[in-house]
Amino acid sequence: MKTLFEDKIIRLVDMSAENTAFLLANSVQKQFAKGDVIAVEGKVCTNCWFIEDGYLRATTTKDGKEIHLNFWLEDTFASNLKSMRTQAVSEFSIVAGEKTRVREFEGAMLLKLYERSPQFESFGRKLLEELLIEQEEHINLFKLTTPTERYQYIVKHKPKLLQRISLTMLSSYLGISRETLSRIRKR
C-alpha cells in the first residue's frame, strides 16, 4: 500500500520506484506534539516537511501578539523556502498545531538531488510550481478581497481548516479581529 507521500510523488511526476525509494530512505519520519516548535523564528530553516497527519502553522509575534501567517494540512509540504534556500534567518516559526506526523527532508539533500536524476529535477520543479501557485493564491486573497470574501474563500476551499483551528487563530490569519470574524460568521 502506498503512503500519502508516495501518492504525492506520483501526482507530481512519473518517478521510478528506485528514485521513490531513495527519497523515502533520505527522509526521516517524525512525530510532533501539539505546540512543538520545529522551525524557530530568527534561525535558519534547514528542513522541509511533508505532512502525513496533523497540521503545521507559521506564526510570528508582533507587539506581543501572535500572528498566524499560514497553515499546512495533510498532503502538503511546509517550510520556509526563502530561509532554506538563501540561508537567511527565518521571519517566522513553524509549530505543530496538533499531534502531527511528518516526513522530514534536509534542504541541502533536496538541492543535491537535482544532480542525481532528471526525475528529481522534475519533481523539484513541479513541487516548486505547486508551492508558488499556492503562495500566489494566498497573496491575491489578501490583496484583492475583503475580510468577508477571505472568510468565504476559506469556507469554500479550505473547510478542514475551520474544523481544526480556533477562531482566534483564524481571525489572526485573516487579518481581522475576532469580533469582526464573529460578525462575518453570523451573516
Image: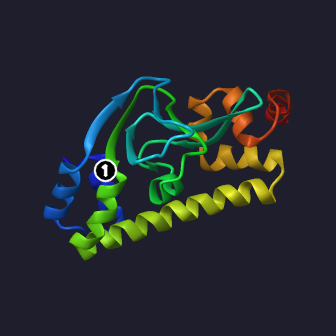
Residue 23 occupies quadrant: bottom left
Identity of the residue drawn at 37% across and 66% down = 124
31 lies above or below 16: above
164 lies above or below 130: above
Front residue (pair 168, 157): 168
Q: Give the class, few, some or many, for how many residues have Cα within 10 Å of label 1's Cα (few <14, many ≥20).
A: many
81 lies above or below 166: below
Task: Left or right? Give the position of 176 relative to 109.
Answer: right
Q: Check the image and name the residue furthest to the bottom.
A: 118
- Residue 43 in the image: x percent, y percent? 51, 41
Q: Check the image and name the residue furthest to the left.
A: 18
| Residue at the spot of label 1 | 5
Identity of the residue drawn at 57% across and 59% down = 134
What is the secondary structure assignment of the residue under circle 1? helix
Q: How is the rendered protein coloured?
A: rainbow
User: Which quadrant does the C terminus fall into?
Assistant: top right
176 lies above or below 111: above
- Residue 81 in the image: x percent, y percent? 49, 55
Task: Left or right? Give the position of 180 relative to 63.
Answer: right
Q: Amino acid at mark 1?
A: Phe
- Residue 60 in the image: x percent, y percent? 64, 36
- Residue 99 in the image: x percent, y percent? 42, 26
Identity of the residue drawn at 44% across and 49% down = 76
Identity of the residue drawn at 64% across and 26% down = 166
Task: Left or right? Give the position of 72 relative to 174.
Answer: left
Residue 139 occupies quadrant: bottom right
* Tag count: 1
